[in-house]
Image (spheres, rainbow, N blue to C red):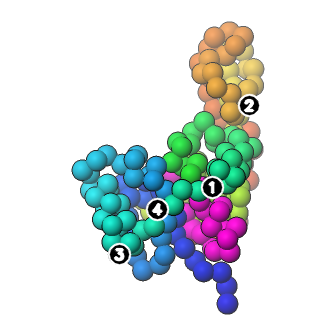
Amino acid sequence: MGKKRILVVDASALIAGYNPLSIREEQYSVPAVGEELVSGSLPHTRFRTAVESRRLRVQVPSPTFIERAREESKKIGDVAFLSEADIQVLALALELKNAGYHPFIVTDDYSIQNVANQVGIEFTPLATFGIRYRQYWILYCPACHRRYPADYRRKTCEVCGTRLKRKPLRKVPIKEGEAS
C-alpha cells in the first residue's frame, strides 16, 4: 500500500472557492494562512469553520523545515515572491512528506507551485492551469544589465539606481504526473 495522500491548503485555494468541509481527505494548513485571509470574508469563514469542525488541521511546521523551504525557494529564485504563509505551507508539506505522507499542496500560487515542483511535492491548482515549467529566476537591471541573486533585498540597482526586474534564467518542463 502507498503512502497516505493528504492535502495542504494555501490561502489562494480558499480565495478561489476551495471548501475544506466538502473534502473527505485529511487536510492541513498553517496558522499564517488564516491570518492572510480577510476577517469576515467567505474564505476566512470557511477556514475557521473547517478548523473548528476538525476537518482542517492547523499545524506550525518545525523551524528545520521552514529553513529548508526558504533555502529551496532561494535556489530557484522565488524567495522574494513568497509570503511567510507560503513558506510555511511549503515547509509543512516537506515535514509531512518526511513523516511518510504523500502531500498535495492545493494552491493557485505559481511561486508555491514552482518551489513545490523543485522539492518533489505535488500540487493541485484550482482556478488556474498551474505551471508548465519550473523556472529559475534572477533579478537584473534593465538599464545596465547587472545581475543580482534572486534573494537580493534591494529593489534598485546598486550601480545605476534603476528599478530591478525579474526574468527566468532557465525553464525546465514539468513532466506528466509531477503536478496534478
The image quadrant where one finds the N terminus is bottom right
Q: Residue furthest bottom?
A: 1
Q: Which residue is mark 3?
A: 22
Q: How many marks?
A: 4
Residue depicted at x 39% and y 52%: 34
Mark sitting on residue 62:
1
Cα gap from disc 2 to disc 1, whole angstroms:
27 Å
Q: Amino acid at mark 1?
A: Ser
Residue depicted at x 33% and y 67%: 52
Element carrying mark 2: loop
Q: Nearer the viewer, mark 4 or mark 3?
A: 4
Disc 2 to disc 4: CB gap under 8 Å: no
Q: Amino acid at mark 4?
A: Val
Residue 109 appears anywhere in the view:
yes
Q: Which residue is mark 2?
A: 149
First in sequence: mark 3 vs mark 1: 3
Residue depicted at x 36% and y 48%: 37
Assess whether residue 101 is covered by the magenta stretch: yes
First in sequence: mark 2 vs mark 1: 1
Element carrying mark 1: loop
Q: Position of residue 118 (x, y in %)?
A: 71, 55
